[in-house]
Image: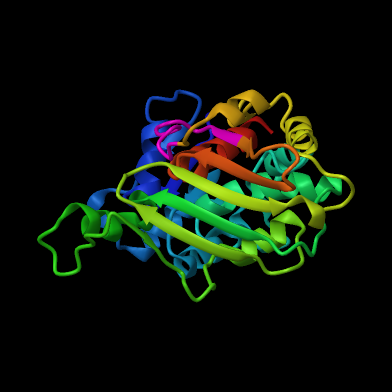
Amino acid sequence: MAPKIFIDGEHGTTGLQIVTRLTGRTDIELMSMPAEQRRDPEVRKAFLREADIAILCLPDDAARESVALAADAGTRFIDASTAHRSHPDWAYGFAELSKDQAARIASAQFVSNPGCYSTGATALLAPLVASGLLPADYPVTINAVSGYTGGGKQMIAQMEDASRDDAITAPHFAYALTLAHKHVPEIIARTGITRRPIFTPAVGRFAQGMLVNLPLHLDLMNGNVTLSALHAALSAHYQGSDIVEVASVEEAFQAGRLDPEELKDTDRMKIYVCGTEGTGQANLIASLDNLGKGASGAAVQNLNLMIAG
């Protein structure tokens, strides 16, 4: 019998993207609440408890409520909110985190879907910490730019409808200037770093896409670290992955610019090791679609692992 999948919050930005990816699949039964019953708590509870796997595309408090309503019924969860991303009892839904992470996701009842920025940051940081090249207390700085769909329906409307009183007219803006972005605890918890990173996210006037940038001073790392050593460590970590690609040294060196829309409408990620050998510096960049590998694509990847597992 095909597993029953319920998307709690299917009409939000992430939920709609997941529905698009799952529609037409014959190996699952996609459940959907009738429009007139979406605000009925008892109907929602029934759907959650009937589902084999519930994908939560909800605010944090609502996601916690959904788990409380159906965890005892054996329902398995993929939570796309921030609520459980640092929780030790939840498997982190970045399958490429380590060699056994995919198996951990496959067998878990509770899976937390990573944040979009966190996906890029974790992809760059975790392999370097695990390999011993990056000290856990390295003073990490992360800069990133995302498409405006990452802000959900409200920001999409603010960016696309100039007639709104709260319309955003800036072509590009930085935010979270208090250094208290919600992805920071997740990055610390899932990468192995121990010093709080300085994280500056930004939004550009493009719908989908993302670049996450990790600048490094090589003399602050362990051993005689070179660009080639960084590339080798990342390449070894992601060897065999059909989702995460590490660009060749030559491609990264010759790239005059990187386009944040490079992987728009895909569920993949591409990593670049940039810089000039001998300068003592490196610039690592992860390119992904904030709604693909950064959200809905990752949720479907995790769903596939859980079904197969």
Residue reaching furthest to the bottom: 178
Q: Give 263 or 240, whichever is nearer the viewer.
A: 263
- Where residue 247 sits, quadrant-wise, is top right
What residue span does the magenta drawing correspond to? 259-271
Evaluate whether residue 110 shows in this view.
Answer: no
Q: How is the image coloured?
A: rainbow
Q: Point out the image quarter for the C terminus.
A: top right
- Where residue 62 sits, quadrant-wise, is bottom left
Q: Left or right: 286 with respect to 190?
A: left
Residue 77 within the segment the image draws in magenta: no
Residue reaching furthest to the front: 279
**Residue at horizontal 50 percent and vertical 76 percent from the top:** 178
**Residue at horizontal 63 percent and vertical 66 percent from the top:** 185
Q: Position of residue 161 (x, y in %)?
A: 15, 55
- How many numbered badges does the structure rendering display? 0
Q: Point out the image quarter for the N terminus.
A: top right
Q: Position of residue 91 (x, y in %)?
A: 69, 51
Residue reaching furthest to the right: 223
Residue 269 within the segment the image draws in magenta: yes
- Where residue 208 sits, quadrant-wise, is top left
Q: Position of residue 140 (x, y in %)?
A: 68, 61
Evaluate whether residue 271 shows in this view.
Answer: yes
Q: Position of residue 221 (x, y in %)?
A: 82, 53
Q: Main secondary structure of the magenta part?
A: loop
- The answer to whether residue 91 is above or below residue 138 is above
- The answer to whether residue 62 is above or below residue 225 is below
Q: Left or right: 170 with respect to 28?
A: left
**Residue at horizontal 77 percent and vertical 57 percent from the top:** 192
Q: Give 26 or 15, whichever is nearer the viewer.
A: 15
